[in-house]
Amino acid sequence: MNPVQDLIKSLADKHGKNRENLLPILQGVVEQEKYLSEYSMIEIARELDLPAAEVFGTATFYSFLEHKKMGKYIIRVCKTITCSMKGKNQILHAIEDMLKVSIGETTPDGKFSLMQTNCLGWCHKAPAMLINNDIYTELTPEKVREILGEYMKRES
Amino acid sequence: MAFESYQLKRADFIFKNENDWEKILSRTLSRPPQEIINELMSSELKGRGGAGFPTGLKWKLTAEESASVKYVICNADEGEPGTFKDREILSLVPYKVLVAMAVCGYVIGAANGFIYLRGEYKYLVPELNKAIKEFEYYCKEINHNFNISIFLGSGAYICGEETALFDSMEGKRGEPRNKPPYPTSSGYMGKPTVINNVETLAHTFTIFKYGAKKFYDLGVQYSRGSKLFSVSGDTPKPGIYELELGMSLQDFVEEFGDGDTKAVQVGGASGFLVPRKKFAETAIGYKGKLTGISLPTGGSMMLFNSSRSMYNVLDNYLEFFKEESCGQCTPCRVGCQQLYSGIKAVKRGEKPAQYLDKLLKLTETMQLTAKCGLGQSVANSFSSIVENFREEMIY
């Protein structure tokens, strides 16, 4: 078995093989692989004995289940109203400048992907962003550069 | 004048740390289920997610179902723009929610509960699991069998709609179902299910501890109790505040505005925009006998001052709806796209100003024909913004 099959098998063992276990399994694959490849979806369908189209249908519904290979660190900048009003664009520019990528792109070393997302639930401390599962709030361009600087020091 | 008695009053129940939750849990579990339901009904607690369904009635209807398997679900898919209170409850006083879920399980006859937590809040999981572990340990000690687990969402606003949430938990696309059947008879896995918002559950803890009267004495007729408000936008004091229901928007703005408040969006992107001239006649509460206009709300209060373009605000909301529409029903899928491109066309002068009236008609159609609350409520912000700030849409 290859590593993806191993991963899917262990996730299915952990969560169960019923339809209601599908989302946790998809999430587990994205966590590890950084995206859901067509191959992963077919393998999940095989493991859970579901039509591959059903797995594809569920997988493509959710904005956090990515379909192209993402960077190790996914930056999601909130673009909903309050963050927008409080300087979301400056934050985006600072990130684009520093990482030399545009929204939707991944750095060539595969370390960072830059995305926008809808309301993160931190409107009172806007603007906000997620890097993987960690939240950063009350951002300023300086603060963002500092945060990213720390991430850049980490190994890719 | 009409609102003399509806002043802004602060309350402090939700975030008050209660060190005796174990005692409250075992005390409540020793009461007959019917008595607990009666207590909730007499408190007149209504759902705090925004829809405002009477909580006691929801529990009662589910309790009356004869199925052997039932579920309790805490809706923590807090995705409405401008709302962030549920995250705070789950971080600061998770045990209140857990106690409420266990009591609900006892009342309706359910052994399993789930917290559907939005993926954006994944960082809450470790602490929340710790709280659940401690809670379940105590339940075992008092011989009460109730399990709670977390189910994580993956970034879909629509999953906050209760039937979409069930489908999501069942491993499907999060698309709302037709109602009826209602969750009380057919919810998660087709079983009778109580699904309550995080804040609603936290309020039941207050009622279990202090009694229905304490809760009922807060607020005004038809809108009893206190409510958390998530305050953001152009305000010197953004944050989460517990206030009694029934206050006038005028009082709210005097307390939270920056002196230059032009409009307040009540209830998030799916709520209503209230312009300055209507602050005095608008009250925050469930529809009832308040004089003037009363607006139910999940507690999102976004303030805009005169430096803000209402066109940009509406554009932002429509982009949000266009992306978050599940795409299942045509009025919402196509309607959101048309509204989004329609206001842009008017702004650029490609369409005449009267085109806005066509778009208003479209929102009326969406309100009548969309399958769920998302498509139906786009009309709220669209019409309240376009009607009150028409010139800003055109020029």
Image (tube, rainbow, N blue to C red):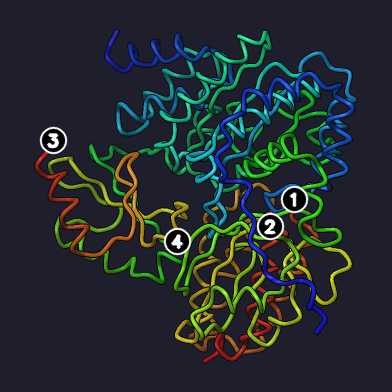
Give, as a three-letter code, the residue at label 4. His
Which residue is denoted by mark 1 in the rendering? B371
Identify the image quadrant of residue B38.
top right
Mark 4 to mark 2 CA distance (whole Å): 27 Å
In contact (CB < 8 Å): disc 4 and disc 3: no
Q: CA distance from mark 1 to mark 2?
A: 7 Å
Would you name the residue on which mark 2 appears? B375
Label 3 Cα neighbours within 10 Å, binned few <14 / some 14-19 / many ≥20: few
Side (left or right) of B95 relative to A112: right
Name the residue tied to disc 4.
A124
Mark 4 or mark 3: which comes first in sequence? 4
Specify the label residue B58 is tagged with: none
Q: Element under label 4? A: helix
Instruction: Mark 1 and mark 2 in contact? Answer it, CB < 8 Å.
Output: yes
Callout 1: few (<14), some (14-19), or many (20+) C-alpha neighbours within 10 Å?
A: many
Q: Is residue B253 above or below residue B318?
A: below
Q: Chain of mark 2?
A: B
Mark 3 and mark 2 on one chain: no
On screen, B237 above or below B334? below
Asked if the residue at tag 1 contacts the one at tag 4, i.e. Cβ–Cβ closer than 8 Å, the answer is no
Which amino acid type is marked by label 1? Lys
Q: Nearer the viewer, mark 4 or mark 2?
A: 4
- CA distance for labels 1 and 3: 46 Å
